[in-house]
Amino acid sequence: MTLAEALDALERAGVSAGLDGAAARDEGERLSAAVAESLSGAPSSWLEGVGSPDASYGAFFEAASSARRWRTSPTDLLAQIAGTPAATAYSAALADVISAACELGVADIGVIARASATAAVQRSVAPGAPPAVASTQPAPPVAAPATTGPPERTLADLLAELDALVGLAAVKEQIRQQTQLLRIERLRTEAGLTTPTLTRHLVFLGNPGTGKTTVARLVAGIYRALGLLTKGHMVEVDRSELVAGYLGQTAVKTSEVVATAIGGVLFIDEAYGLAEDEYGAEAVNTLVKDMEDHRDDLVVIVAGYPGPMATFLATNPGLESRFSTTVEFADYTDAELREIFERSARKADFEPTPETLSRFEEIASVQVRDEGFGNGRYVRNVLDLAITRHAWRLRDVEQPTVDQLRLLLPEDLVAGSDGTDASPTDGTAPAEEPAHIEEHA
């Protein structure tokens, strides 16, 4: 079901429930934006789905900001009819909207797990529905105002989360050094001392799946905790979300995206895509100007492969001077990939056996580590396929036990992220395995 179809169905369910149809549709649009907020490429897909393809990306980010609270609590209209028979159909329609939102971009296992939890929250208010266990944190009041950014966290909490990431020893050290440097700069400024002008913008170099996006989100929070940013949110984009189809419009489009990131971090993935033509050059020129105009409340992080990134920074004199700090993300070791696999599986409420973990490390050790190797993304792909094979393995078990539902066995593993197995089949896998299962957490 597409987002447009899901919104149509939600509007009909709202009318049947005695609600204002337009208000129900607006609620669905905002909730879908909040669910898809972290998906690369989602803004344009969302605008198309809600019937406003020519609107600015700011509409998407504003909608997402206004509905973040609904990821852990019922929507406002649903709360009005909670416990009534009408709530069953309306909450089911909201769940369909959430599912459609996951299709607006490439959703990894974490996004799908969070979306499943959000759907469970909405369904939990229907008569006879079991209570949802979507989060260990207390849900905010239904009538709470929309927030302008993520909940404020202490610097100590954010640095502890950084330290808890698998591997990335050099990255952690550099981020801590940058944090200390900026902290002292702020204290010197407050004391009335002369301070050097330090650039806050960063270059993240590394192959896909090495944690660049995760660390960028932490940097946004760290800068906010230091008092350098007012919101501490992160807006993730690539070339397609900055460049328009003709000259002149690109500058407007880029400035609109930058405006949504003010107070936080603008994360540009594969930024060297902007060095390809005159359209990208227009985006770069606009970006440099906007970085200067908002230098006190905007941080830009550009990310990608080392070689192309050097070429990109050389395309505009203003870029090199503004990106003086480079953080390099190394590929994960076999042992680190194993730990990521174990953590990801347990986060999705699966339990890999020790033999499964050993088998995973063996499979990972023979993968070619070139630019096409996905690191963390490879792990997620293997886990997705393992969950699919796990489900197929239990196809003849009518009432599996909790242990059977949770345990991942060595035979559930697929050697390659493309679905090919390095070992002969043992009969537990289907002849043609489905590429993905809709929900598994």
Image: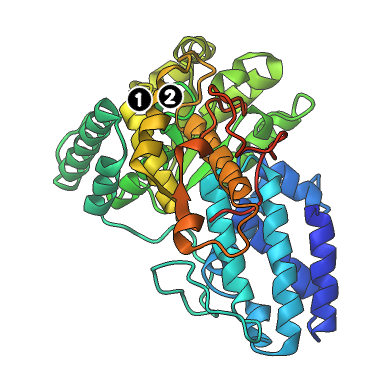
The image position of residue 268, as x and y in percent, is 53, 31
Is residue 204 at all visible to an observer of this figure? no
Relative side of 191 to 397, left or right: left
Residue found farthest to the bottom:
84
User: CA–CA distance between discs 2 and 1?
Assistant: 6 Å
- Which amino acid type is marked by label 2? Ala
Front residue of 315 and 160: 160
Query: What amino acid is labelled 1 in the image?
Result: Asp
Q: Is residue 89 left or right of residue 208?
A: right
User: Which residue is nearer to you in this view: 1 or 287?
Assistant: 1
Viewer-nearest residue: 28 or 125: 125
The crowd level at tag 1 (other Cα within 10 Å; few <14, some 14-19, many 20+) is: some
Contact check, label 2 and label 1, Cβ < 8 Å: yes
Residue placed under numbered mark 2 in the picture = 364
- Tell me where residue 63 appears, x and y as whole percent: 64, 59
State the SS at label 1.
Answer: helix
**Badge 2 or badge 1: first in the primary sequence:** 1
174 lies above or below 71: above
In the depicted structure, whether residue 434 falls above or below residue 274: below
Residue at horizontal 22 percent and vertical 43 percent from the top: 186
| Residue count near mark 2 (Cα–Cα under 10 Å), binned few <14, some 14–19, many ≥20 | many
Q: Is residue 70 left or right of residue 359?
A: right
**Viewer-proximal residue among 401 and 362:** 401
